[in-house]
């Protein structure tokens, strides 16, 4: 009887341990990863906590400059106003709400995972500001997208992301986490991570010499040494020299 009880206790311990140690298998030779998120209700923050429990990544939280605003008040009057300003003039920096300064350098990362809420079928205006400001710095990097919503589909947010980041390599399809499956986010993230195409390690270009492997091949590279097919504004390497586009 005592041996039976010990066996049952050991079995229960193994089962509980496996539930609490959900880990995704991400290749060891992948480059550094940054998770960028904005969270208004706290759902995206919980998603990020689950995500960073499974992969090695640094975390950057985006914050609006003006604190305490109620974007959902009066049937999302303020939130809608911010989204409409962007929609009416998406190429004007003044169309985007101000955010706090960001001190993390994107040059240190090859992979970036964006976690954002959905506002009225669009990407939250605060996250749109960050992506608009960072588009040139993210060119050539591998990017993944996780969207949190109550129940609405995320196709509009995916379209916003593709508009704001035209020169990145998308690692895979966006992950949609909504109210009905939020409690299962750990397993959803685990399965999603397995589908992503993470960038491999890239050595940052600190200096250039006449024998540089980047000299004379005609291609354009980011400052991380990643080849960029469609560069936007920013500093790049071409034929062994720094160029500004």
Image (cartoon, rainbow, N blue to C red):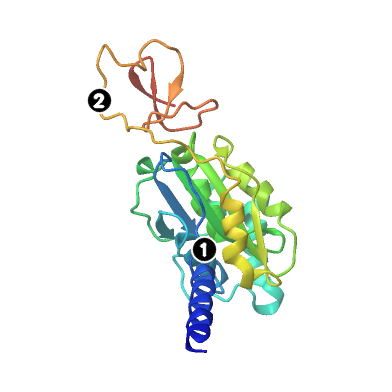
Instruction: Pick out the residue farthest to the bottom.
Output: 1
What residue is at 47 percent from the left and 59 percent from the top? 54
Whether residue 173 is visible: yes
Name the element at disc 2.
loop
Give the image location of residue 87, x and y in percent: 67, 51
Can you see residue 78?
A: no
Give the number of the mark in front: 2 or 1: 1
Residue drawn at x 40%, y 54% is 56
**Vertical arrangement, residue 88 with respect to residue 185, above or below:** above
Q: Where is residue 76 in the image (x, y as percent from the top left)?
A: 68, 72
Residue drawn at (56%, 53%) of the image: 128
Q: Where is residue 238 in the image (x, y as percent from the top left)?
A: 40, 18
How far apart marks 2 and 1 lie (CA) works out to 41 Å
Instruction: Using a 10 Å C-alpha cutoff, classify the residue at mark 2 as few (fewer than 14 neighbours), some (14 to 19) or many (20 or more).
Output: few
Which element is circle 1 on? loop
Q: Which of marks 2 and 1 is nearer the N terminus?
A: 1
The image position of residue 13, as x and y in percent, is 48, 77
User: Can you say which quadrant of the picture contains the C terminus?
Assistant: top left
Residue 54 bears which disc, if any?
Answer: none
**Dots 2 and 1: beta carbons under 8 Å?**
no
Of 191 and 78, the residue lying toward us: 191
- Judged left or right of residue 80, residue 208 is left
Tag of residue 207: 2
Q: How many marks?
A: 2
Left or right: 99 with respect to 76? left
**Residue 183 placement, left or right of 202:** right
Between residues 77 and 56, which one lies in front from this camera angle? Answer: 56
Relative depth, front residue between 132 and 32: 32
Q: Which mark is residue 22?
A: 1
Q: Is residue 97 above or below residue 233?
A: below
């Amino acid at each position: 009887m005592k041996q039976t009880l010990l066996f049952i206790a050991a079995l229960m311990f193994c089962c509980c341990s496996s539930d609490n140690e959900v880990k995704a298998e991400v290749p060891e030779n992948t480059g550094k990863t940054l998770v960028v998120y904005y969270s208004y209700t706290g759902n995206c923050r919980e998603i990020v906590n689950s995500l960073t429990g499974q992969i090695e990544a640094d975390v950057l939280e985006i914050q609006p400059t003006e604190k305490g605003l109620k974007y959902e008040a009066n049937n999302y009057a303020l939130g809608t106003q911010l989204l409409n300003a962007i929609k009416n003039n998406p190429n004007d920096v003044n169309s985007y709400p101000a955010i706090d300064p960001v001190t993390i350098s994107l040059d240190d990362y090859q992979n970036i995972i964006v976690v954002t809420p959905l506002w009225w079928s669009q990407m939250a205006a605060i996250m749109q500001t960050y992506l608009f400001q960072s588009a040139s710095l993210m060119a050539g990097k591998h990017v993944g997208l996780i969207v949190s919503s109550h129940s609405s589909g995320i196709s509009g947010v995916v379209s916003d992301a593709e508009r704001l980041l035209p020169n990145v390599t998308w690692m895979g399809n966006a992950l949609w986490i909504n109210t009905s499956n939020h409690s299962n986010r750990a397993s959803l993230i685990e399965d999603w991570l397995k589908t992503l195409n993470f960038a491999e390690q890239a050595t940052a270009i600190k200096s250039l010499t006449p024998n540089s492997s980047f000299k004379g091949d005609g291609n354009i590279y980011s400052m991380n040494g990643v080849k960029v097919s469609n560069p936007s504004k920013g500093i790049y390497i071409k034929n062994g020299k720094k160029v500004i586009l």
